Amino acid sequence: MALLKRTVIPLVSLAAAAAVAVAGLLISLQTLREATVAPVAAPEHSAWAEGVNLRFHDDAGRLGYALRAARQTRFQDGRVEWRLPVLLWFGQGFGQESGQGAGNGGANWRVEAESGVSPPGGERLNLSGNVVLRRSGVGSAAPLTLTTTSLDIDIPGEVVSTAAPVEMDAGPLRQRAAGLELKLAEDQLLLLGEVSGSHAGFSEGRDSPGNSGPARGDDANALP
């Protein structure tokens, strides 16, 4: 009868193998622990709202201006972003009482844009995209429209300004400039740099009898 072969494995070898296995498991667990995904950072914004309609009054209780937007997002650092903002200014102007503007919901000026940002503090509003300013026709003040691509609004100072190219349409009068400064309370518009323009019906760069011709210069007061 053939003898069965037996393989003897020393106990010391079994213990060593077990120790290696345990060590490998510990290393794997440590690696898994180190590879754990870090917690998701808290969102930067702290609040948001849609269909915003804010109204601000002066110390006498008169409506000064209103700010509307399709969406408002407030961030933890204090800044606010606006989507499709519309600013309506009802302040004193044109020698009229507040809120006598026609065609802008009673506002004297209406400013709208694709987007806007208010830095911390909320005293300024920076608009961008297709920015349009419209003045209502009140008293002797003719209606007009200004278009540009960016605009800075100093809300307490009631001053609007930009260094971006501007186009003005005031009925028969059309002008272009390299920038503008508009003092809302005084209804004073200053076109800044490379000012040019014409009256409808006359080619730019030509003078015609009975017509003031194109307006050209470095700066120009532009409100008709």
Image (cartoon, rainbow, N blue to C red):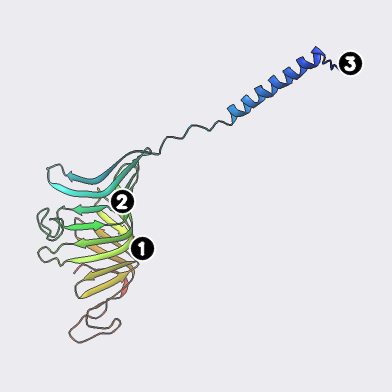
Sequence order check, earlier mark of 1 and 2: 2
Q: Nearer the viewer, mark 1 or mark 2?
A: 2
The residue beneath circle 1 is 164
Q: Quarter-wise, where is residue 223 in the image?
A: bottom left
Residue type (three-letter) at the residue carrying disc 2? Arg
Q: Nearer the viewer, mark 3 or mark 1?
A: 3
**Gap in angstroms between the C-alphas marked 3 and 2:** 91 Å
Residue 73 x, y percent position in the rendering = 32, 43
Q: Quarter-wise, where is residue 33 in the image?
A: top right
Above or below for 205 versus 154 = below
Callout 1 secondary element: loop
Residue 183 x, y percent position in the rendering = 23, 57
The residue beneath circle 3 is 3
Image quarter where the N terminus lies is top right
The residue beneath circle 2 is 83
Above or below for 100 versus 199 = above
Callout 3 secondary element: loop
Above or below for 90 versus 24 = below
